[in-house]
Amino acid sequence: MRREDDEQLWELLGRAAEYKPSPFFARNVLRQIRQKRGTTETVRAWLSWRRLLPASAVLAATVAGILVLQHPLKPQSQPGGDADVVAKIDPQDYEVVADLDDLLATDENGVWEDNSNSTL
């Protein structure tokens, strides 16, 4: 920007008091930089493998334990388990099944079929 572009601005800037930083300005800036670097290093230290690996192992074991306690494993049925069910059937049930077979046989013979030619 040239002085001829804005004379009033340059006159105002010429009258303004000059700002001088404190003698400890550089020291204060460096101290704040070190403090910020310290916090990032602290966070980085917490996120190191030495702490993350054991913490994640404990978390995984805890989650697995909760899942096992909430959903216990059910014993799988054995192939021979069906024979036990057949052995427990009451002999009277065999008679009912035989009667049902006879009923189905008579139903297939057309006793219940609708005869459209017959009149009621």
Image (cartoon, rainbow, N blue to C red):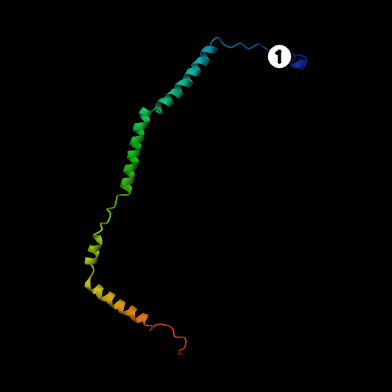
Up the image or down, 51 lies above or below 67; here it is above
| Residue at 53% from the left image edge and 12% from the top image edge | 26
Point out residue 24 in the picture as x, y percentages from the top left corner. Answer: 53, 11
Point out residue 117 in the picture as x, y percentages from the top left corner. Answer: 47, 88
Does residue 99 appear to the left or right of 46 in the view shown?
left
Up the image or down, 48 lies above or below 8; here it is below
Does residue 83 appear to the left or right of 26 in the view shown?
left
In depth, the one of 21 and 108 nearer the eye is 108
Up the image or down, 94 lies above or below 43; here it is below
What residue is shown with label 1? 13
| Residue at 42% from the left image edge and 24% from the top image edge | 42
Q: Quadrant of residue 109?
A: bottom left
Amino acid at pointer 1 = Leu
Point out residue 31 in the picture as x, y percentages from the top left corner. Answer: 49, 16
Does residue 118 appear to the left or right of 24 in the view shown?
left
**Rendered-image quadrant of the C terminus:** bottom left
In depth, the one of 85 and 59 nearer the eye is 85
Point out residue 33 in the picture as x, y percentages from the top left corner. Answer: 50, 18
| Residue at 30% from the left image edge and 79% from the top image edge | 102
**Farthest front residue?**
109
Other residues around mark 1 within 10 Å, as few (<14) / some (14–19) / many (≥20): few
Q: Secondary structure at mark 1?
A: helix
